[in-house]
Image (tube, rainbow, N blue to C red):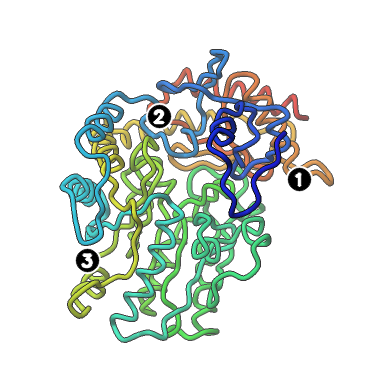
Amino acid sequence: MDELPHEGEMAPQGEMAHRVSRPNDLDAFWMPYSDNRGFKSHPRMLARAQGMSYFTPEGREVLDGTAGLWCCNAGHGRAEIVEAIQRQAAVMDFAPTFQLGHPIAFEAAARIAEITPDGLNRVFFTNSGSEAADTALKIALAYHRARGKAQRVRLIGRERGYHGVGFGGMSVGGIGGNRKQFGALLPHVDHLPHTHGLAANVFARGQPEQGAHLADALENLVALHGAETIAAVMVEPVAGSTGVLVPPKGYLERLRAICDRNGILLIYDEVITGFGRLGTNFGAERLGVAPDIITMAKGLTNAAVPMGAVAVREGVYDAVVNGAPAGIELFHGYTYSGHPLAAAAAIATLALHRSEDLPGRARAIEPYWEDAAHSLRGLPNVIDIRNCGLIAGIELAPRPGQPAARAMDIFRKCFDDGVLVRVTGDIVALSPPLIVERPQVDRLFGTLSDAIRAAA
């Protein structure tokens, strides 16, 4: 192989052209959240998607048990979304939203505000759930500063929480593997205990009975730091990426009450639970407790174009925007905030969301889904099963000295047998497109059952 140019040197034109045509040998792409060495020695490739399925380059069908990555709620290859993106690309591919606007971004925001919980009707666009999490935290800090409460700088997350990979969301998040590699994180951050009570709530269906008292840990942090120093608490209504942790009955109600008593904003990360995943527009509706700020992404565009958003209460918006002097009110944003193609995808997705009543479809099949998930109880090494909406988590006993190895074997076996599942540690997490039907549920859990037995 020829030597690469030294830093600062440009390669000769002919040499550069030669390098551009290098073969696709999988080497150039540094894959995210992946065992790059393991994958590239035994790749698992997806080449096409339609409806409930992916297809490999060889044409083998793989039933999608994870909605891509918790995101393709309407299924794959929806013509309405594809055509909306194509039309918009032909009209205008990009327009900035710094001191300029384009109608489709405002329409997308209005369509979101139609389905968010009452009062959360101001929408700030981002490009991902990670960006939405950092944006929500910044808005919370700006809100308190605008009200003369600049000392409210402390942010509270939760153990085993996941709020993306920006430095804000990673700091408030509570997954050790996401944090330990990067050293210094945000200051003034603390964490509540997670709600996973295996002993008290094993094999619970829906919200578990025990654990509401865990919200009282926020009172301890108020006593420790002083309420006047705390800006916001961020939690997932149902923690997804850490293994489907469903909130105990009464937990969110207590958390909301403590926040209200102490002037603390409550932020829900609904990147996974939004857009029908729990059988309602947002998890706040299903669980009966509304926050002050909601982050969203994934199902917002059915993942056809990357997009995230933050919806805030009118009072939060008014404090930041109407309380500021003339000029820019919030010094924050992204080049692609409200990108025209993403906005077109969001509008088309939300039209499908309404016309096909995707939350209603999830509610209708949820009892069948729940029974299918809990039918795995009693299989070798299955130590817990959790579910809420169209999400299920199957927790496995780890192999001694080999954490996550058993679940990874199950993941590979399922893929080889034509079903895509997701694993996090020794937990198998399932979240199919909301268009799933009973025969596909049967196939998903039947294949998973066989894989669990094989991994024993």
Q: Earlier in the sequence, mark 3 or mark 2?
A: 3
Say what secondary structure mark 1 lies in.
loop
Q: Residues within 10 Å of mark 3 (few under 14, many from 20)?
A: some
Q: Residue 332, relative to residue 375: is it above or below?
A: below
Residue drawn at point x = 24 percent, y = 55 percent: 97
Locate residue 24, reporting x and y percent.
60, 27
Q: Disc 1 and disc 3: Cα gap in Å?
A: 46 Å
Q: Which residue is mark 1?
A: 403
Q: Are marks 1 and 3 in contact (CB under 8 Å)?
A: no
Query: Separation of disc 2 and disc 1 at Cα?
Result: 33 Å
The picture quadrant where one finds residue 280 is top left
Residue 419 in percent (x, y) is at 57, 23
Q: Do the CB atoms of the residues marked 2 and 1 lie less than 8 Å apart?
A: no
Quarter of the view holding residue 180:
bottom right
**Would you place residue 213 above or below residue 126 in this image?**
below
Q: Nearer the viewer, residue 388 or 336?
A: 336
Q: Position of residue 219 (x, y in %)?
A: 50, 77
Task: Indicate which disc residue 365 carries.
Answer: 2
Q: Could you tell me if residue 61 is visible in this image? A: yes
Q: Residues within 10 Å of mark 2 (few under 14, many from 20)?
A: some
Helix, strand or loop status at disc 2: helix
Q: Quadrant of the N terminus?
A: top right
